[in-house]
Image: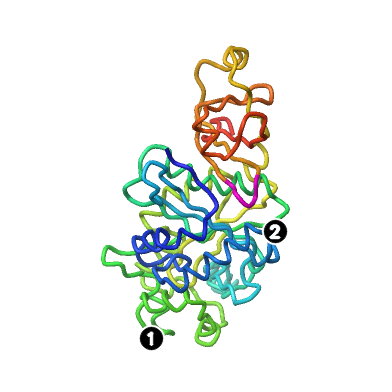
Amino acid sequence: MLVVRAIHEGDLDGLFNLASQVGTGMTTLKADMKMLGDRLATACASFAETIPPEERDYLFVMEDTANHRLAGVCAIKGAVGLTEPFYNYRIGTLVHSSRELNVFTKMETLYLSNDLTGSSELCSLFLHPDYRVGHNGKLLSKSRFLFIAQFPHLFTEKIIAEMRGYQAEDGSSPFYEGLGRHFFKMDFHHVDDLTALGKKSFIAELMPRQPLYIAYLPQDAQDVVGAVHKSTAPARRLLEQEGMHYEGYVDIFDAGPVLQARVSELRALRDSELAIIAPDDDMVHACAPATTEPTLVSNTTLRDFRMIITEAASVNGSIDLSAAEQQLLHCATGATVRTLPLNVKKNQ
């Protein structure tokens, strides 16, 4: 069975194995043992609440309990850009007109921006290819929303998610080749590695502060502004189902879209409910519907957060979980859990 849980100190090797599968373009999950070790230490301190909320980095792993293998990883950062610069391009519009010539044109532009500084961030979502079946991707991605619903006070009003931008089959980025290379004079992968290591001062030093006209870029670079990597498209759809949307901010290297939302408007904040694990008796079974939709269920413990998918339904504030499911959640009869339908209702 699969469970999404708070990362533990003993998960470093498994985390490194996952990071080794990711490839380029995800700067928050590089196969660097020192960087991952530092991040794991921060994550453990985050769940233990020994560092301030804005410095926290909640890292979750999906574990296959049959073989204790880590099948996926995802994270939420308390706030971005408070200790190191956080840059995006904001897509704007400049109007050029001449009444005398009867010419009126609107030109899209890229502005180097720090507008999203201080936002909480969803990041580091990766599911091992061996586990990309059934509901596994939804379980991993949506676990973060149930965590936010349980602990909304730990996050800022706005939450964002940087999506990996489009890459060609050879791993190159048309946007970077059409723009960034002219300023950085280095390969896309090298820039990607520097950013992952936190060496971001070169961005402000080398990038122009003036608006850049998108129409001046090569056509293949224009075509991918706001487009996602092919393996990231499912993740984008899941985030949009949960209430996140694109508002014209893109990554400065690969032009991947930045999705954002108000935490208070997320589906999990609106639709999740608390329920009590009911005793295993005939009355509960009699009240439960014959068939149910898959439901996400988490415990309510920050330090030992755990979440699963179940076919059980919450009825009148109670939910009937099997002994195995309770064990996965580290809960018992009478404990409080948080529930959320896995799938968005069609009329929403």
Closer to the camera in the image, 83 or 323:
323
Mark 2 residue crowding within 10 angstroms, few (<14) / some (14–19) / many (20+): some
Quarter of the picture containing the C terminus is top right
Q: Is residue 122 depicted above or below 109 in this figure? A: above
How has the structure been colored for display?
rainbow
Instruction: Point out residue 12 in the picture as x, y percentages from the top left corner.
Output: 44, 62
Q: Is residue 167 above or below residue 309?
A: below
Q: Label for residue 144?
A: none
Percent position (x, y) of residue 87? 56, 73
| Quadrant in which residue 104 is drawn | bottom right
* On screen, residue 343 above or below 140: above
Query: In x, y percent, where is residue 35?
Result: 47, 72
Q: Give, as a three-letter code, the residue at label 1.
A: Lys
Answer few, some or many: residues within 10 Å of disc 1's Cα (few below 14, many 20 plus, some between 14 and 19). few
Q: How many numbered circles are shown? A: 2
Q: Residue at x 40, y 48 (%)?
A: 68
Position of the N terminus, as image quadrant, is top left
Q: Which residue is mark 2?
A: 156
The residue drawn where x is 70% and y is 47% is 264
Residue at the spot 68% in from the left edge and 57% down from the top edge: 155
Q: Which residues are magenta?
A: 301-305
Q: Are marks 1 and 2 in contact (CB under 8 Å)?
A: no
Q: Is residue 290 magenta?
A: no
Of the image marks 1 and 2, the number of the one nearer the N terminus: 2
Amino acid type indicated by mark 2: Thr
Main secondary structure type of the part rendered in magenta: loop
Q: Which residue is mark 1?
A: 185
Specify the farthest residue to the right: 153
Q: Position of residue 314 (x, y in %)?
A: 62, 26
Q: Is 235 positioned to the left or the right of 288 in the image? A: left
